[in-house]
Image (cartoon, grey):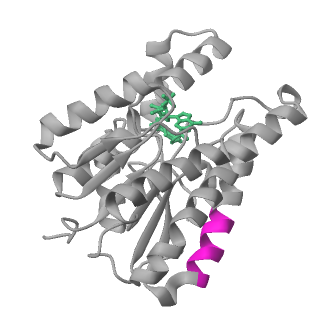
Amino acid sequence: MDLGLAEKTVAVMAASKGLGKATALAFAMEGATVYISSRQEAELHKTRDEIISATNNKDVHAITCDVSDEGAITSFFTQVAEKSGGVDILINNVGGPAPGGFNDVQDSDWLSAFEKNLLSYIRTSRAVLPYMKERQFGRIVNISSSSTKEVIDGLILSNTFRAGMVGFAKTLAREVAADNILVNTVGPGRISTDRMTELNAENAKKQGISAEEMLGRSIAQIPAGRLGTPDEFAQIIVFLASPANAYLTGQSLVVDGGLLKAL
Ligand SMILES: NC(=O)c1ccc[n+]([C@@H]2O[C@H](COP(=O)([O-])OP(=O)(O)OC[C@H]3O[C@@H](n4cnc5c(N)ncnc54)[C@H](OP(=O)(O)O)[C@@H]3O)[C@@H](O)[C@H]2O)c1
């Protein structure tokens, strides 16, 4: 199936590793022009080089950007516009907020999680929409979490702001659908990345068991019987963000191997 991505310019935020990196790689494989960003320059450049050598697509570019920083977002999209005209497809992503329950987090944590995990997606969307409207084509896919469907104990910041993100995305989707701009949200269940390893280690510590045992218990809850791979997650994003998806918008999906029981 030709996804029609060869002529498209894609920005994947927070893409030096994990889900963002796998998503950027999958777009590069489809022949798109891909811009990746994250905070640490050396790691980001290494990822760009890896993607170029794995896909033979030389149109993969790295520009550092801390998405918590409005000025950095403006600078990132200005540079992309100068080089490629604008962004047809935006993949919003950022590292997860600090773990903790209600008594573990202060106002400063709430404010920084808002800026990092919700306001960043709003600001990046604002940056790309004028070009998408002018072209009468655009796709925005927001990476979220399964916590948008079923809250996860001990992750109050994630549970709160990702729910806000879904409300934002649904509303925006309805406002821009007539301009052929589709906005969707995709949440990972348990996908094998550094973030998943860190959360697993943290939960193991809390429960006084080994990380291996914790992982075994976690996998036992997944009907598919294993963690997902970043590439399996990325393939869903690439389809939703491609011209091949012409009518699905405003949706919030989870890619979880059957983990969630919520309808
Ligand atoms: N993996 C899962 O199963 C899972 C499950 C539920 C939710 N999620 C969520 O999905 C998202 C991606 O997860 P992941 O597993 O891929 O995480 P990861 O492996 O920890 O990767 C996070 C990426 O985000 C970048 N990043 C972090 N903060 C940033 C910032 N302020 N500005 C720009 N880039 C930033 C990191 O690079 P730098 O540090 O260099 O910036 C890195 O490239 C996270 O929000 C996570 O909470 C993942």
At which x and y percent is residue 68?
Answer: 65, 41
Q: Residue at x 46, y 73 (%)?
A: 131
**Which corner quadrant holds the N terminus?**
bottom left
Residue 261, compared with residue 60, is above or below; it is below
Magenta stretch? 166-175
**Which corner quadrant holds the C terminus?**
bottom right
Q: Residue at x 43, y 27 (%)?
A: 41
Front-most of residues 83 and 144: 83
Residue 45, compared with residue 263, is above or below; it is above
Residue 122, compared with residue 150, is above or below; it is below
At which x and y percent is residue 113?
Answer: 73, 40
Q: Residue at x 79, y 32 (%)?
A: 101
Q: Residue furthest front?
A: 82
At which x and y percent is residue 249?
Answer: 48, 77
Q: Is residue 56 visible?
A: yes
Say whether residue 218 is left or right of residue 84: right
Q: Is residue 251 visible?
A: no
Q: Is residue 172 magenta?
A: yes
Q: Residue furthest bottom?
A: 178
Front-most of residues 11 and 140: 11
Front-most of residues 141 and 229: 141
Main secondary structure of the magenta stretch: helix
Say whether residue 212 is left or right of residue 108: left
Q: Residue at x 62, y 49 (%)?
A: 147
At which x and y percent is residue 150?
Answer: 63, 52
Q: Residue furthest left?
A: 56
Count of numbered labels shown in the rendering: 0
Residue 58, quarter of picture: top left
Residue 122, quarter of picture: bottom right
Q: Is residue 193 magenta?
A: no
Residue 154, quarter of picture: top right
